[in-house]
Amino acid sequence: MIKQILSKLPKKVPKSDSSDSGRSESGNTTTFGNVFQCTNVGSTISSKLNVVKRVSSVVFPASMNTGVEAIDPSLSFKDVSNTQKQSLFISKLNLCCKVYDMTDPDKNCSEQDQKRQTLLELADFVSSGSVKFTEPSIAALCKMCAANLFRVFPPKFRTSTTGGETEDDEPMFDPAWSHLQIVYDLLLQFINYNSLDVKVAKAHVDHAFILRLLDLFDSEDPRERDCLKTILHRIYGKFMLHRSFIRKSVSNIFYRFVFETERHNGIAELLEIFGSVISGFALPLKEEHKLFLWRALLPLHKPKSIGIYHQQLTYCIVQFIDKDQRLASSVIKGLLKYWPVTNSQKELMFISELEEVLEMTSMPEFQKIMVPLFRRLGCCLNSSHYQVAERAHLLWNNEHILNLITQNRQVILPLVFSALVHNSQSHWNQAVLNLTQNIRKMLSQMDEDLVLACQRKFEEDDARSSAVAERRRITWERLEEAAARIQSIGGGGSGGGDILVPVKSASTACSVAC
C-alpha cells in the first residue's frame, strides 16, 4: 500500500540534470535572470556614462570606500548630481593623499598643480555648506590631512644654539606651503563645521591624531605654527573629551623643552593657546591646574631663550593669579628660584613680570615673600648694569607696590637701605644716581625716624666692617714680616735643608686674619 502511494509522488530532478538541462537550453545565451541583470547594469552604465567615469579600486582602497561609489576625481562638483557629490568629495580627498616633493619646482609640476586645484575645490565645497560629514568622509579627510601634514622635520633645519628660533633669526618657510595652507584650511573648516557629529569625529580625531598635530608645533615656518595654534584651540573647545589629554601632552612638551632639549619653535604659540584656556578655568581651581602652573609654567623661566615666549608666559601666569590671588606668593617664589645671575636682559624681563605680579598681589601674600623678594631687589638696585638698576628703581613709581612697601616699611627699608647708600656713593650712571636720590627723599618723607635709624645702623655696620678690615690688614702684615724673617734665617744657614715654620704662631695669625 505504501509503495503504491510513493510511486504516485513526482520524482526530484538531480542537480546535475537541472544544470545540464539549463546549459542545453541556453546554449551560448544567458538565462532570463542573467539577461535581466545584465540589462539593468548596462542601462545604469549608459545613463551615467556622460557624467561619471569609473576608476580602479587600486586608487581608492576598499577599506576607505565601503559603501561609497568611486567617481573620477577629475570631475567638477558642478558636473555631478547632488547624490554623487558626496562620493566625489571622498574621491578627491583620496586623490590628494599623494604627497609630492616640493623642493624641486620642476618635478611633477602638472601633478602638483592638479592637486592644488583639487584642494581648492574641496575647500570651496566645504565652505559652501553642501558637504555632509559622514563617517566615510571624516575618515577620508583625516587620512588626507595625516598624509599631507604629519611629517618629521629634518634635524639640519633646526637651530643649534638656543631653543628654536630667536628674535634675530630669519624665519624659514616650507616649500610645500601652497598645499599645506589649503589642507590646514580644510581641517579648520572641518573642526568648525556646525553640524559636525563630535561622537563620530572623535574616533578619527583621537589621541594619536592630536599627538601628531602637537609635534608639528616644532615647525620652522611661523605660518604653519599660526594655523596650528588656531586649529588646536578649536579642537580643545569642541572635543571636551580630549581637554585633559591635551593639557598633559602640552605639559610633556614643556618638560622636554625645559629639562632636556631647550629647543622648540612652538612654545610661544602653545602658551598663547593656554592663555585663553586658563582664562576659562572654573573656580575654585582644580589641583591639576595648579600643578600645571607650578610644574610646567614656572620652570619655563629657566631656559636662555625665554625672550621668545616671555610675553605669552607672563600673560598665562597673570591669568592664574587673576583666578586665585593666593597663588601670587608661590609665583614670586618661583621667579626668585629661577632668577638670572649673569644674564642682564633676562633679569630685565623678570623685573617687568614681577611688577605685573605684584600689582595683583594682596597684602597677606606679599608679606609671605617680602623678605627674600627685597633682598633680591636690593641687589638689582645696586646692579652695575644701569638698565637693571634703573628698572628696579622704577618699581617704586607703581602706586600699588609703593603702598605695599609703605605698610611694611619697618621690614623692607633695612633690606634696601644699604644698596641705596652705596648707589649714592659710587654708582657710575647719572640716571641711576638721580633715581636713588628721589627714592631716598621719598623714604624720608614716608618715615624720617626710620630712615635715621637705618642710617645709624648702616654707619655702625660700616664702622664695624672697617674695623674688621683693618684688623685683617694688620694680621696679614704680621704674617708677611714673619715669613720674611723665616726666609732670612733660612738663607743665612748652610742651605739645602727644609725651613720649619713655627706652627703655633702661624695658626694663631691665620685665625686672627680670618
Image (cartoon, helix red, strand yellow):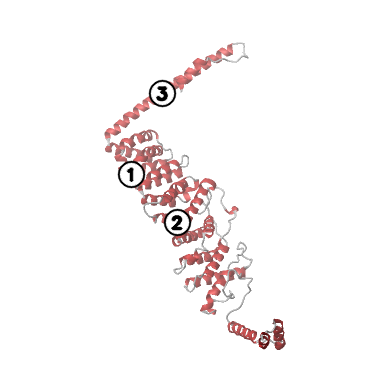
Which corner quadrant of the image does residue 405 belong to? top left
Is 434 placed left or right of 60 in the picture?
Answer: left
Residue 166 visible? The answer is no
Nearer to the camera, 388 or 137: 137
Q: Amino acid at mark 1?
A: Ile
Report, in whole angstroms, how far the alpha carbon at label 1 lies from the one at label 3: 37 Å
What residue sits right under mark 1 in the picture? 401
Q: Nearer the viewer, mark 2 or mark 3?
A: 2
Q: Which residue is mark 2?
A: 273
How many residues crowd around disc 3 within 10 Å: few (fewer than 14), some, or many (20 or more)?
few
Q: Amino acid at mark 3?
A: Val
Tell me where residue 465 appears, x and y as whole percent: 39, 26
Residue at image coords 46%, 66%: 192
| Sooner in the amino-acid sequence: mark 2 or mark 1 | 2
Compared with 451, 285 (above or below) is below
Residue at 55% from the left image edge and 14% from the top image edge: 488
Q: Secondary structure at mark 2?
A: helix
* Residue type for callout 2: Ile
Mark 2 or mark 3, earlier in chain: 2
Q: Determine which of the numbered discs, if any, sits on residue 110 in the image.
A: none
**Mark drawn on residue 468:** 3
